[in-house]
Image: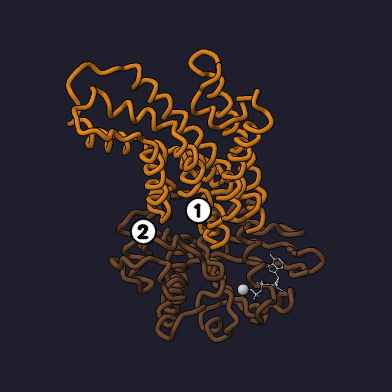
Amino acid sequence: MEWKRMVGSRAFYPALLLAIAGILAGVNWPTEHKVLETGTFYILWNEALTSDALVFFLPLASVLAYGDSFVQDIRSSYIRILISRQDRKAYVRDRMRVCMFSGGLIWLLAGICSFLILFLLLFFREGTGAWDPKVLQEAFWRLVRLVLIGSWCSAMAGAFGAFFLSSYMAFGLPFLSYYLLIILHDRYFQGYAAIDPVEWLKLQKDWGDNGIGAYLVILALIILFVVLGKMAMGERLEEI
Amino acid sequence: MRNQSLEMKTCMGKPMIEIEEVTKKFGQDTVLYPVSMTMLAGQVYGIVGNNGSGKTVLMKCICGFLPATSGTVRAGGKVVGKEVDFPEDMGVIIETPGFLPQMSGRKNLELLAQLRHVIGPKEVTRVLQRVGLDPEARKPVGKYSLGMRQRLGIAQAIMEDPEILILDEPFNGLDKHGVADIRNLLLEMKEQGKTILLASHNGEDIDLLCDHVFEMDAGILTEIR
Ligand SMILES: Nc1ncnc2c1ncn2[C@@H]1O[C@H](COP(=O)(O)OP(=O)(O)O)[C@@H](O)[C@H]1O
Ligand SMILES: [Mg+2]
């Protein structure tokens, strides 16, 4: 039910378009009209997955789709219709789960769409040759991290929305937190790459084998906000 | 004769909802003074009272939407808020409920039906017709009039055919036809032996439908019929 509701919600497609635009804005489009090197489309895609444009769009597109759904339920009193069919525990579990996945889903779909777009636009201008699986592999893991960071943002949206019972907070605070971490890192704690969301995406520092450290940091943050969000929602649901 | 067969069908007399000394305070304000009431199977109960007298608050306590400050509500023998989150086999409409505004009425009900998995699209069509809404209409609920939304609210309350119905101001926002439609619907439900609690600030509907009538006055509930 939750998934259908999310995909049917008004903000889903704008969020998806924003995410696709965020990826495509970072593409270093070839300007010359000559035959392109083999694999240009996925090499450009791979680069776009860590571009500055994408870093900017990331928290925005992640929270739009479903970040304030809990706030909406309470404000519209839709919650009473739901709780008459589903106990509070099940509701909170489903709501937080879908909230969390919504941000990741947007980026997963945007990643796939932008890949297809680049393929259609560039592949037929490329010369033939062997593909480079290394680049594709790198891009795949970048996409995974993108999805995880998107989930972190939307989990924050769910938690902040429930805590303040406000759509503005649901949309605004993940955005602020994300930038705050980037700024803290750039200005004051340059040695602590672990707090920098951009670094989680780019993995320029040493994060252990295959960047395992970055995945653990993001996962821990997701779990933290899912737990906080569930607590905040539980509190809000005592009187409905 | 008919009464007898009804009695067999619904085991009339079995307590469905037992309210024991329920009080509710919001901060210093006492909104409900100790309220006790037992709802027996197959009976229709009405509460009349002015706006702000506490009807909605009592109904929310029955549903477990609000925790009572003291006292207990039992539904089917289970304490609401402790043993069950929400009473089993109960349909409810409290004030005019919200739906997902961007989806049609039909889509809304179909999504809700997936939470309990007891009815499918066919039953959704039937219930929409019963409350006088067009099952094929694609208009999103956000563009519904108050009366249409009220009809949809009643539809969601009855669609899974619950034994107990809690209806807070079900005639709210309905025009003359709407009131007549819903009144007939409730009479039908009564015939089927449902247990119903109805609140209204309009005594006329209550008189017609209810076996027992209570009055709520500033948080004090008294039986008047
Ligand atoms: N969540 C709440 N917090 C504080 N006061 C409330 C709350 N809900 C209802 N009240 C108060 O309780 C009283 C009874 O309200 P209500 O049950 O809605 O009246 P009605 O009989 O019209 O349904 C009113 O004075 C209302 O202001
Ligand atoms: Mg009321």
Which chain is drawn using brown?
Answer: B
Quadrant of the drawing holding the N terminus of chain B: bottom left
Chain on which label 1 sits = A
In the rendered view, would you say B192 is above or below A209?
A: below
Residue extending farthest to the top is A209
Please report the residue visible at 61 percent of the width from the left and 38 percent of the height from the top: A225
Point out residue B32 in the picture as x, y percentages from the top left corner: 74, 69
Identified by mark 2, the residue type is Lys
Q: Is residue B68 visible?
A: yes
Point out residue B122 in the picture as x, y percentages from the top left corner: 30, 58
Please report the residue visible at 41 percent of the width from the left and 66 percent of the height from the top: B141
The residue wearing badge 1 is: A85
Q: Residues within 10 Å of mark 2 (few under 14, many from 20)?
A: some
Q: Residues within 10 Å of mark 1 (few under 14, many from 20)?
A: many
Point out residue B177 in the picture as x, y percentages from the top left corner: 40, 84
The residue wearing badge 2 is: B107
